[in-house]
Each structure stands twice: as C-alpha cells, then as structure tokens.
Image: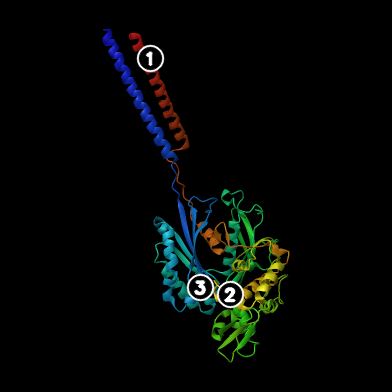
Amino acid sequence: MEDIKDSNENSCTKNILVILGFSCVISMIVLIAVGISQNKPLPQNVKYGIVLDAGSSHTSLYIYSWPSEKENDTGIVQQIEECQVAGPGISKYAHKLQEIGDYLAECMERTRYVIPVSKHHETPIYLGATAGMRLLRMESEQLADRVIGAVIRTLSTYPFNFQGATIITGQEEGAYGWITINYLLGSFFQNSGWLSGISEKMNHEKTFGALDLGGASTQITFVPENHTTESPENSLQFRLYGKDYYVYTHSFLCYGKDQALWQKLAKDIQVSSGRSLRDPCFHTGYKKVVNVSDLYKTPCTKKFKKTLPFDEFQIQGTGNYEQCQQSILELFNTGDCPYSQCAFNGIYLPPIQGNFGAFSAFYFVMNFFNLTSEKVSQEEAIRKIRNFCSQPWNEVSSSFPGIKEKYLSEYCFSGTYILSLLLHGYHFTSKSWENIHFMGKIEKSSAGWTLGYMLNLTNMIPAEQPFTAPLYHSTYIFLMVLFSLILVSGIIATLFICKKSSYFWREMV
C-alpha cells in the first residue's frame, strides 16, 4: 500500500511540475510578445506638399513634409528637397508653350523619387507665379493665360494631387515671405522643442520684417509700431497661432534687380550720344551689345521709350560707384509724397522699426561680396562694393572664372542697387542697418514666400489621428504585472516542490 501511495505522490508531483513549467513558459512568451508589440517603433504618418516658385528669372521646386497629427492645428512644415529648374522663368515660354513640359520634367521626375510612391496620389502640388508673369499679364493677358494653361496641363499629367497654378499678387508674395521667416525664426512659438536651434537672442514678442528682392519686383513687409495706417491698401491682418498681427506690405513691381537695370539703361540711353553708352555700373574694359527691341520689350521701360536712330547700342563700362549710385537714384521719385512719409514713387512707408530678414537676391548678391555677417557695418559694405566696381573687367573675370559672365558683370550694379534701395528707397540708416540680417536658409529651409504659402495651405488640411500603440498604457501595465506574478509564482512553487521532493527521497533512504 505504501508503494502505491508513494507512486501516486510522485506522479502528482510530476504533474504539478509540468503544469507549473507550462505556466512559466506561457507567461514568458506573453511577456515577450506584449513587450515587443507595445514598444516597437510606430510608423510615421508623414504628409508631403510641393510648391513651385515660378519667378521672373528662374523656377524653383520645393518639397515640404509635416506630420499628419498637426501641432496647434498647423503642421510643423519642413523643407526636405529643393530643385532648380534649368532655364529662364516661365514667362519666357509665352511663344514656345510646347517646351514647358520638357522644362519642368527633370525636377518633377526627381520629385517622384523623393516622395514615397504610396503618398503620390495624396500629395498636393501648387505653382505660384510671381512678378515675371505679372509683367507678362500687363503686356498680354491672353499670353499669360496660355502659359498658365500649359503649366496646368503639364503638372496634371503627374501622379500627384494637382491643386492649381496661379499668378500670386505682390501683396501675397510679401505676406507669405514674412510668414516664412517668422515661422522659421520661431516668432510664432514659445518654448517649442523643434525650434531648439533658434538663436537665444530671439525675442518671441517681436516679429522680423521681411525684405525680398527678385528679378522683377521687391517686397517690404513688417509690423509697424503703430497699427493705424495712412494707406489701408498696404495693410494686412493675420491671425496666427492665436495672436493677431497687423502687417504693412508693399510690392514694387519693376524694381527687382533685373528690371531696375533695364530701366536704368532705357533712361541713360536717352541722353547718350550715338550708339555707345558709357556706364559707371559696369567695370572698366567691359563691353556688351544690347538690342533696342529687347530694351523696350518689358512694360517696365515703357515710360522711357524713345525712338532711337539705331537698332542696337554698346555698353562701355567705366566702373565708378558714386556715379552708378547717382544714376540708380534717378529711378526713385522721392519728391512727391501724399503721406507723412513715403518710400519712393509716392508709396506710403511707416517708420522702419525692428529686425529685418533680407533674402532671395538680397542674400545672394551680398553673399558674393561676403557681406552677410551681422558684424558688417553699412560703411564697410559701401567700401567693399565701391572697391569692386573700380576693378578693371579683366581682373574681375580672371578672379572669378567659375561665374557666368552675365552674373559677374552685373554684380557692381546689383550691389550698388541694393545699397541704394535699402538706404535711399526704404530709408535705413547706419544705425538701423545693423538690424538687417541677410538670410539664405534657416533651419535647412530656404527663406522665401513658398514655405509661408505651404503653411497657409496646410492649415486647410485636417489633422489625422496619430498612430498609437496596440494597447492602452493601463492595460499594458496590468498584463505585464499579472504575467510577471504568474511567472514568479510558478518559479517559486517549482523550487518549493522540488526541494520538498528531494527531502522526501532522502528520508526514504
């Protein structure tokens, strides 16, 4: 009987150990499975947007991304790609519409590669045309419509969610540029972790003004000290991130650097003798032939149009900064002002105040002269550009062999024009000059109007629910504790039974 009893006890012990072992294994499997599934990286739900900046001299394509679960109802938009379209601005294709498809193809194909295929159909794409197309529309609304129509047909063939191609106003261009730099500099946020790289000097209670210079127009936008304005058409109101902003903005069409040069040449050729124009804004020894038909092709030179006894003339550089500036200042009519204060041409301008971000051609030209450092004074900028203009063309061309002749030959004019515009057009002083910050990129995003445009568009895109872990946090904790207790209890019970069984067999012996 005792043998049978011992056998039954031994069998029972083995069964209990098997059950406990099985429970421990199951508990370990559950703990590992729950831990892995709960803590694996969540998929990123990222959205993309494409904006093409169709400027007067070139077109740029920008790709932006932002998380679908937006912060404060506005996506944290970041630039992830930039593509410069080879060739001039789209307005130059008014008489060769069939080439627009090839013109945009390279950058559009690159976009297919950058944005995941699964996101193509939902990625919005927009094209905004600026001053070059505004000038073409002044010249011929029909031609401008044809160009935009060709662009629409081309972009509609790609697998993205095409939203439209439009000619934006100068006021919109200025306003979106202002939004861009203040967004990137953190003016609309406080204590945002994603903006940890922004300068500690930034005062979040103040915004930066925006100075934009293109080939055909220039914009100035800032928050004036007094919200009341003498010129309501130059005033805009924004509500961004729960705060109201009253902004002054104006776009000076025909005062981009390229059109300003055409204006100056059209003005100066009127008083020149013969087919030769001695021009102080070009280096001594530089010569260039200009067609009269090209000179009067743009609406910006219509006011200087004059019947000339020749079809072309030759520019002969004389390289003199002071004379160049004097010639440029004749483009700015500062005599007639119907307001308490004007910029030029009778356009109201509130007193300049605060910091300004100067971008686009402001930055590119001043960067060529190494004048983008905040330590550079107004006097040093004038001295450096004066010295550059006085250099003979053969020295300049040999010193910068990698720069195209067209751009290199115009840097004397462009640098002098920028100083003239800022100091005499916008009335910056030697003291307020210190508040101009020349900006190319901020936080890896290009300073310009396109990001502000994208920010406005993403505000219209509803936020999506973020991806979440498969279990609620409380459920996850409960399961981990429960199966941990089962595992520990099983191990303790197994050790106890094994120890008791060992003691029992020693007693039998």
The image shows residue 15, relative to residue 51, as above or below, that is above
Whole-percent x, y for residue 448 in the image: 57, 64
- Looking at the picture, tell me which residue is in the foreground, 224 or 450: 450
Whole-percent x, y for residue 98 in the image: 41, 75
- Label 2 CA crowd tier, 10 Å (few <14, some 14–19, many 20+): few
- Looking at the picture, tell me which residue is in the foreground, 184 or 381: 381
Residue 71 at least partly seen? yes
Q: Amino acid at mark 1?
A: Lys
Q: In the displayed structure, does residue 115 sit left or right of residue 405?
A: left
| Label 3 with label 2: CB-CB less than 8 Å | no
The secondary structure type at the circle numbered 3 is loop
Task: From the image, state whether disc 1 or disc 3 is nearer to you.
Answer: 1
Residue 89 badge: 3
The secondary structure type at the circle numbered 1 is helix
Q: In the displayed structure, does residue 402 sit left or right of residue 335?
A: left
Task: From the image, state whether disc 3 or disc 2 is nearer to you.
Answer: 2
Q: Residue 240 sits in which quadrant?
A: bottom right
> Between disc 3 and disc 2, whose residue precedes?
3
Colour scheme of this structure image? rainbow
Spatial CA span between label 1 and label 3? 91 Å
| Label 2 with label 1: CB-CB less than 8 Å | no
Q: Amino acid at mark 2?
A: Ser
Q: Which residue is mark 1?
A: 500
Whole-percent x, y for residue 262 in the image: 59, 79
Q: Which residue is mark 2?
A: 398
